[in-house]
Amino acid sequence: MQDIILQAATNIRDSFDRFHVEFKIMTHHASLRFEHRDWQAIQSDSMERLDHYKKYVTASVERTHELLSDKINDHATWAELKKEFSKLVANRYDGPIVETFFNSVLRKIFISEGINEEIEFIDFDRDVIFVNPDQPIYNSFFLGSDSIEIVIRRIMASYNFNFKFADFEADIAYMTERFTKAVRKAFVKLSFDRVDMLRSVFYRNKGAYLVGRIIKGNKLIPVVIPMVHSERGVEVDNVLLTQDEISIVFSFTRSYFFVEAENPAELIHFLRPLMPQKSVSELYSSIGYNRHAKTVLYKEIYQHLEKTDEKFIVAPGIKGMVMSVFTLPTYNMVFKVIKDVFKPPKTVTRKQVVDTYRFVFMHDRVGRMADPQEFEYLKFDKSRFEQEVLDELLSLASEAVYVEGDKVIIRQLFTERRMIPLNIYLAEVDKEKAKKAAIDYGNAVKELAAANIFPGDLLMKNFGVTRHGRVVFYDYDELCFLTECNFRNKPEPRSHEEEYSSETWFTVGEHDVFPEEFRAFMLPTGDLRDAFLKAHKDLFHVEFWKNMQDKHTTGQVIDFFPYQRRKARKEEGVLKLE
């Protein structure tokens, strides 16, 4: 039996290695996609990469069934299998990622059981990062007696880019100016020790990003240099030198980067000081290791519970008709459980809700949708729930939640980043912040449309505001492709009776949408109404929506950039989609 256990452990390891090779090949292709401006291919790769993991887990599960046969559900066998697997992957740079793959295989077999530390890798105290000091993942550029311009020239030369710059000298001058201002502001004197730049380039959509840090003593300035194509060649589009700017680039509302990382944990170790407010799980997601991010997020949740005596409470905001939503007072996540029954006018099914959340996970979120993570069979102490929360879950979501002894077991749960609901935010902040958020609400709807997404339910309560003041959509139960909608003008009434009828007097199809009706619930009140109408009155006209549909049916890939562009032309923060 020991030989079979070793074969099973080897099978799981080898399945991961085959997955990881394909993952790395697709990641490597991103640089070629960028060089050749093959935007549709990089979008396709982004979705395909998310499916690869599942394919190799499924194949490994099938082979494990064949090997273990009647011992497939035997805990003692899996405990031995875990030990053998640990020996096979000991001291690997990607060890934590491999262990997550093992867990994924195991969870497909023990799907209805809670977490079991005896047979899966959930070590709450482990935080080991293997770093090779002889081969750091970054290059260092020392200032010494050189000028900042010379340092920047050395940085750019180190990447050996295969593309042509539109105006390289203008870019060098721009970067030199931005570095100089940031160094003088942060360090007073115009000096620093060195600049560390990651060797790997980060690719996403139409952008390529260089990431690093400026070091002086124990202080650092984060650095992100986005590059984009223009008609004449590649241009440096900005130089981002603050934590907030960089945090938005790595946002949970964005698609995952393509970035080559032989040692993912070491890459995370480099990124964390640049964005100290981001969790490790969020950073793992940002570099494409979303499955491992779930493992880390699970540990983060339970570590938070261990460190506090907080109880789960009802999440702030207007209660939804589809989800029961709860949170922890000082934790920045919400937990969403699908209710058993949806009251009218909701007509969606449970399966449709699950499908839309999985759709959002697969789709480009363009900075306007929160990244949902799905968990199954999580177990919490009953004592950690406020009675109001537990009563609601057991009465409204009994298909997904049950109590077993002193434990609450949740069969299916979605997590999202916690945000302030837009309707609450507009009522609580000062006029200037409220105006910016109201206008950004319209921007969010337009950017979702540009990504071929129609939210369905456009009520302000279904949008949240991040700590950076960005408006994000987070209620997905009525979401669909924009191209599936039939945008119409309301027919003119043919009689006095039709004009004043309380009932709809004309035929409405399943996918019909009437933009002029958005005024009834999208418009804020008072001065905010005027600001919104000035910026976004086109949202209430069929022409805007049909124009966006035409862009998608003709295969146009619209630009989305998570920063203020160097040459951008904006009016009061209003998004212009041409």
Image: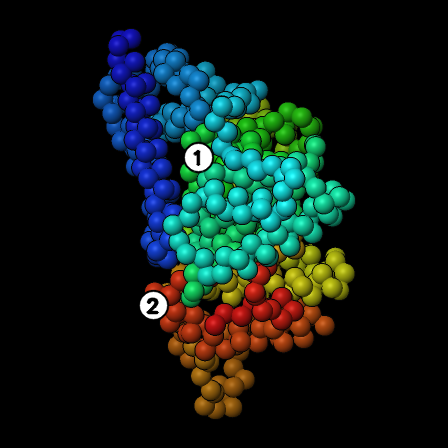
Quadrant of the image occupied by residue 219 = top right
Residue at 30% from the left image edge and 19% from the top image edge: 10
Q: Position of residue 395 (x, y in %)?
A: 55, 41
Q: Amino acid at mark 2?
A: Thr
Looking at the image, can residue 368 be seen? Answer: no
Mark 1, secondary structure of its residue: loop
Amino acid type at circle 1 is Ala
Q: Of label 1 and label 2, which has the lower sequence position?
A: 1
Kindly identify the residue that appears in the image at 60 percent across and 39 percent down: 195
Q: Residue furthest front?
A: 145
**Number of the front mark, 1 or 2:** 1
Instruction: Report if the CB atoms under discs 1 and 2 are less than 8 Å apart.
Output: no
Q: Which mark is residue 458?
A: none
Quarter of the N terminus within the rendering: top left
Relative depth, front residue between 200 and 472: 200
**Which residue is under mark 2?**
553
Q: Residue at x 69, y 28 (%)?
A: 308
In the figure, 506 relative to 364: above or below?
below
10 Å neighbourhood of mark 1: few (<14), some, or many (≥20)? some
State which quadrant residue 486 falls in. Answer: bottom left
* Residue 198 visible to the viewer: yes
Q: Is residue 531 above or below residue 176?
A: below
Place of residue 224 in the rendered image (x, y in percent of width and height, measured from the top left): 56, 47
Q: CA distance from mark 1 to mark 2?
A: 36 Å
Residue 393 at x, y percent in the picture: 56, 40
Side (left or right) of 84 relative to 395: left
Residue that appears at 74% across and 64% down? 432
Label 1, on which residue? 261
Secondary structure state at the residue bearing disc 2? helix
